[in-house]
Image: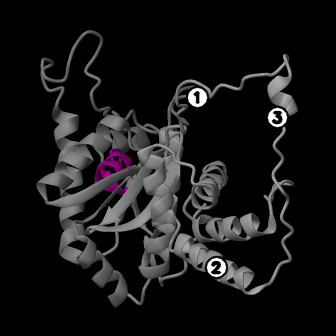
Amino acid sequence: MRDEFESSREWKLRKKFLDANVSSLTQDRLICLSKCFINSAMYGCSYPTAVMKEIEMRSCGLLEEYQEEAKEDKKAAAKKSYAVSFVKASDGKSELESDPCQMNLDPGGGNHTLHSPTFVTCKVRLEGKVIGEAEDSNTKAAKSEAARRALEYLGRHCWLLKLKGVDGTSTVSKTELFREIQQRTDDAIGETNLGNRMLRKMGWSGGGVGKDGAGIVEPVAAHGVLGRAGLGLSSSSAPGAGFEERQFRQKVRTALRQYIERGDQEDLRFSPEFSKEERKIIHQEASKLHLRTSSRGKQADRFLTVGHKRSSQQLLQHISECGGETNSHVLLPPGSYQAN
């Protein structure tokens, strides 16, 4: 970073300024302010008020240190003795004055103001304390860098609560939820069924009916679908169209109450096979029972989890009581977080 025309004293002072502010400024702004600091401290240059205030704030006592060194150098130079030869004044006129081609040098007109680029300063505060700060000409970049530094600070001083996968979470599938209905369908034609006994008396031994045994083996089952009452009809206007929805709500409500009565502390996961309308009903029923719901995944893999509502302190206490790890969370000590 040293310029080829920079003296050793200038570089020594500017290097101290660079080292003192390298962690809080971008590279371009750091180099610009360091040169402004040298021009102001060593050559008396002045800049706009905002620039001068920032130079004074970031010099961190370097100016006083330089002034003390300058005083010592003057004292050391005064102690040395020099042989000075005096030159007699001549009474002749200067050749330049009699030269008809003399050039008059006039001072330049007007003052020139150095305009510094506009920088945005972003600070992240926690309970009044700055935990992350960054400057940049781009607002989004300043916010992103300040947030990254804030996360680094928190990672060094705070415990980290990391969300795990859902491999160990208890899962509820559609089959389990409608197990009773399925069992009733499977037993629709049992050994004691009148039609079953009549067919057996006629020589039927099982399997498909008909001449070649090509008839159906399993009875026809009605599969309820939520929110589909027919072409041009809604579930609210069709007679009996809300039966499947009421039945589904009842099953969901029963499963959630059993979850609460068992005292399970881990989250309950509803598999991705539930449709969007069904997940909405699960969310409504969980809210009535003061349970927390959250959706995860995308498209065909999207699923819903249900759990107990806990504050941050309650969640931290629960995980600590479980040895620092549950099926959904793991508690990591300070210093474990690595910002990207």
Q: Residues within 10 Å of mark 2 (few under 14, many from 20)?
A: few
Tell which circle, 2 or 3, labels the residue nearer the N-terminal end: 2
Say left or right for 135 vs 12: left
Residue at image coords 30%, 40%: 278
State the CA–CA distance, disc 2 to disc 3. Answer: 44 Å
Where in the figure is residue 267, as x and y percent of width and height?
Answer: 34, 67
The foreground one among 212 and 39 is 39
Q: Is residue 97 left or right of residue 70?
A: right
Q: Which residue is mark 2?
A: 69
| Residue 137 spot, x, y in % from top left | 54, 40
Q: What's the image's color scheme? A: one colour
The mark lying in front, picked from 1 and 2, is 2
Name the N-terminal-most of marks 3 and 1.
3
Which residue, given by chain and number where applicable, does mark 1 sit on? Answer: 214
Which residue is pictured at 40% across the width and 37% down the height?
219
What's under tag 3, amino acid-wise? Answer: Lys
Is 82 magenta? The answer is: no
Q: On residue 93, which mark appears?
A: 3
Q: Amino acid at mark 1?
A: Ala
Single out the mark in the foreground, 3 or 1.
3
Q: Position of residue 211 (x, y in %)?
A: 57, 26
Magenta residue span? 176-192
**Label 1: element kind:** loop
**Secondary structure beneath label 3:** loop
Q: Position of residue 92 (x, y in %)?
A: 84, 38
Quadrant (top left/top right/bottom left/bottom right) for the C terminus: bottom right
Q: Is residue 272 visible?
A: no
- Label 1 environment density (alpha carbons within 10 Å; few <14, some 14–19, many ≥20): few
